Amino acid sequence: MLNEASIQAVNAAGWRDAFIRPLYGSYCFANLPATIYYALTGEGAPGLPDDVFGDLPRRYDTVVLFFVDGFGWRYFERIAEQYPLLQYFVRRGAVSKLTALFPSTTAAHVTCIHTGLPPAQSGVYEWFQYHPELDRMIAPLMFSFAGEKARDTLANAGLPPSSVFPSDTLYPRLERAGVRSYLLHPREFADAAPTRALGENAKSLTYKTLPEALVNLRRAIAERHGPAYFLMYYGAIDGIGHEYGPTSEQVEAELDQFCVAMERMFLDRLRSTGVLLIITADHGMVEISPKTTIYLNQTVPRFQDYLATNQRGEPLVPAGSPRDFFLHIKPERLDEAQAAIGAHLAGRAIVVKTADLIAEGFFGPAPSARFLSRVGNLVVLPLKGESAYYYAREKFENRYYGHHGGLTREEMEIPLLMAAL
């Protein structure tokens, strides 16, 4: 079943012609954790609108969630009729269209799926962001200083993960309700500080390849004792989309591998019952090019003069990504910077005060002090196909042909596939 109400709601969520707004009050990724908790326990608010279940039952002994990084609605819509896996959800389950959070970034969504908190409350909103306790720019999911290649370097600075991420996750609550949780992550970051912090009270399972993960997940489901929640993160589609672009042959190959492997190694062989199977994504992706990226520090006159600095005198930059470039501007220069950068990017991006987006609820309701202390006060939102960023050789530059973080439909529209087994 295609949930037409969800499609109509997201289609009607347009904002400033070129963009859409996140639907935190209804069809939004932010409400998925509450829906999962409700399906397993019957407690709390249902989260997403009831019609996302279609004719499916509302309560389950086990929920299995595939968090497929970058698998936006544009992909589902393009390939849905080609693969039995996707047709299984259309014909025997329920397919809804959701909006991503804003920013449409993995950092925000990974934090949300583990905690149920939107960026305004979690304080984790982007790949790079300011961290007041260190007075530096950091990469939360890498748990490193911005621009560093190695993971977990913030630990060397004495920073505990609780200083970056919320400590109240879904898993202790599920444990108290008698539900065991299992998290499947790629081996390379399964033991990283953010994974351990956000996955506390859940059992960690690791994998190297997709087939390995699907076999091990299927066996873990079969061997479970009592109610259980399984969450598997899969990132290959997003990674290849960044490198080659969302319409590339390489992405088509990754989509094919995922759908065929899921069908043959998981869905066709899973014999368990009482299971709610969910596939969703954190965001989609839009085409960009390194050849057309606008580097503001190279092209905007006196750009550096607008930037706020830390106590070391270092500019607080960059925050966000080339699709949602957040700027920390000196408060007394905010209007001037908005006008100058907006004029420079006319026809290619809009430049908006973050306070206006907060007031309109783009980051979610009830912004926390933690979020407000971290977010920049001005944001550049490029139009479809455009990108704007900050250049520092070997540290900050755009090398991608596909990206996300902004508010275009390609980035913000995601599928929610649900079926009962």
Image (spheres, rainbow, N blue to C red):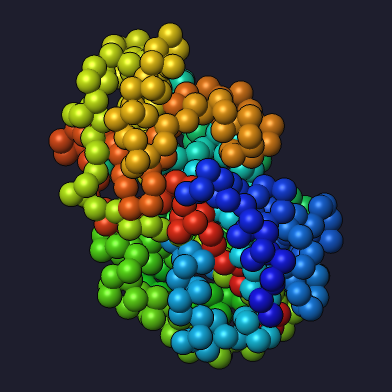
Q: Residue furthest left?
A: 393
**103 displayed left or right of 252:** right
Q: Residue at x 27, y 75 (%)?
A: 249
The spot of residue 291 in percent (x, y) is 18, 49
Q: Up-down: is 210 above or below 347?
A: below
Q: Residue at x 53, y 59 (%)?
A: 413
Q: Quadrant of the C terminus?
A: bottom right
Q: Up-down: is 376 above or below 69?
A: above
Q: Give the image quarter of residue 53.
A: bottom right
Q: Residue at x 35, y 41 (%)?
A: 347
The spot of residue 196 in percent (x, y) is 50, 48
Q: Residue at x 34, y 35 (%)?
A: 346
Q: Up-down: is 141 above or below 229?
A: above
Q: Quadrant of the N terminus?
A: bottom right
Q: Is residue 183 visible?
A: yes
Q: Give the image quarter of residue 57.
A: bottom right
The spot of residue 412 in percent (x, y) is 51, 54
**20 displayed left or right of 396:** right
Looking at the image, which is closer to me, 250 or 270?
250
